[in-house]
């Protein structure tokens, strides 16, 4: 099944394909399967990350609609907001970020970068998932702007489609290599839905294993239902004639720890072991937790010697410098 990505307007924001590397020393340290890594921490936009792929389509759509201001939302240390701020700067658009929490005395990590990119920051208290975007949208519109809403985490059909295209990029890069599992951090669901779509479209056999990061639910639907619904809507948009059902989604919820953004021993060990065996940085919120999950799955025997595991590095390293 061929997906036609050209029908959607796209703007170039990063350097693709991102590298695919093997991690032999990590593999050996764990006494486990062969481990590979897809380096989306190296997308090239403002210190990189998985949101770059989604933004190429989302901001392509914003340009098509002749918007002059981008609005999106996230946590104070949102990687998505930082990449959106950089992309808007590159395209000459204003960027408005609705961030959860209160303004800290000293901006650090991603928040410092949001400021350097000249974004307008609106503090939203308890609301870190875009609850206040609509109100800001109306306000900007009333002031004569043409705002464009990028959803929380960039996770709508276009964002998911970008990750179906990423699956194609991986496929073209692998040659005769094949994987038994693709493991990654899943939070707003666009990466997850896109990789499910890509697996289906390109007839792959690997398991698409999302490690859940954030236990807080938004809206009426459970998170796995949201991912399924997004995968189905993205399939429709891409003209892929397939209906995903509950049996198609793998969401591992064992590593939620003390909640979103709270670093524990699992993340700390994963960051240290990956840095010390491979010289690669993970982040404390997403990839540290997902790699912690992978390591635990090796130790528990859920992943074995015969497996060939791809860890999709989704970025986030600026959060290492947050306090
Ligand atoms: C946003 C993000 C994720 C999660 O991707 P979703 O598509 O939102 O599920 C994972 N890792 C990092 C570093 C992120 O910034």
Image: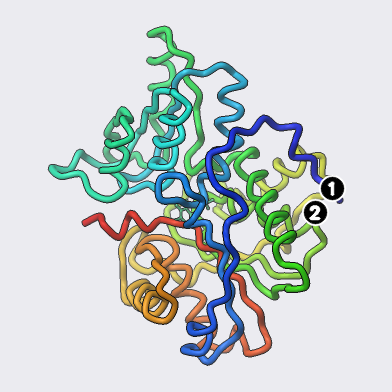
Q: Is residue 263 above or below residue 236?
A: below
Q: Is residue 302 above or below residue 121?
A: below
Which residue is depicted at the point 48% across and 49% down? 44
Write down the residue under mark 2: 201
Residue 248: give x, y in percent of width and height.
72, 61
Q: Dot 1 lies on which element?
A: loop
> How far is mark 1 from mark 2, CA to CA?
7 Å
Instruction: In the rendered structure, find residue 260 and report the number of the disc placed on it.
Output: none
Q: Quadrant of the C terminus?
A: bottom left
Write down the residue under mark 1: 2
Q: Nearer the viewer, residue 33 or 104?
A: 33
Q: Residues within 10 Å of mark 1 (few under 14, many from 20)?
A: few
Residue 42: give x, y in percent of width and height.
49, 56
Residue 199: give x, y in percent of width and height.
74, 59
**Way the structure is coloured:** rainbow
Horizontally, residue 3 falls left or right of residue 308, namely right
Which residue is depicted at the point 33% across and 30% down? 119
Q: Nearer the viewer, residue 198 or 168?
A: 168
């Amino acid at each position: 099944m061929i997906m036609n990505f050209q029908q959607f307007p796209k703007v170039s924001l990063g350097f693709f394909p991102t590298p695919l590397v093997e991690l032999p020393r990590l593999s050996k340290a764990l006494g486990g399967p062969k481990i590979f890594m897809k380096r989306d921490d190296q997308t090239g936009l403002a210190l990189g990350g998985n949101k770059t792929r989604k933004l190429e389509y989302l901001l392509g759509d914003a340009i098509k609609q002749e918007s002059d201001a981008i609005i999106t939302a996230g946590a104070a240390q949102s990687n998505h907001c930082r990449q959106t701020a950089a992309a808007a700067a590159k395209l000459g658009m204003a960027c408005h970020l609705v961030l959860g929490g209160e303004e800290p005395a000293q901006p650090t990590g991603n928040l410092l970068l949001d400021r350097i990119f000249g974004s307008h920051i609106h503090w939203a208290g308890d609301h870190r998932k875009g609850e206040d975007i609509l109100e800001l949208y109306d306000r900007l519109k009333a002031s004569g702007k043409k705002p464009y809403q990028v959803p929380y985490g960039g996770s709508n059909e276009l964002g998911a489609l970008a990750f179906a295209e990423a699956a194609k990029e991986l496929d073209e890069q692998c040659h005769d290599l094949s994987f038994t599992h693709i493991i990654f951090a899943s939070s707003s669901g666009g990466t997850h839905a896109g990789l499910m779509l890509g697996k289906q479209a390109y007839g792959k056999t690997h398991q698409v294993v999302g490690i859940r990061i954030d236990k807080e639910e938004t809206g009426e639907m459970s998170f796995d239902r949201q991912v399924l619904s997004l995968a189905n809507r993205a399939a429709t948009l891409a003209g892929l004639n397939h209906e995903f059902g509950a049996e198609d989604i793998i969401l591992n919820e064992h590593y939620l720890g003390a909640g979103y953004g709270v670093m524990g021993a699992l993340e700390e060990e994963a960051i240290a072991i990956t840095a010390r065996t491979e010289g690669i940085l993970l982040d404390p919120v997403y990839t540290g937790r997902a790699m912690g999950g992978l390591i635990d799955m090796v130790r528990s025997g859920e992943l074995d010697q015969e497996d060939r595991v791809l860890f999709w590095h989704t970025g986030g390293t600026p959060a290492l410098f947050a306090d």
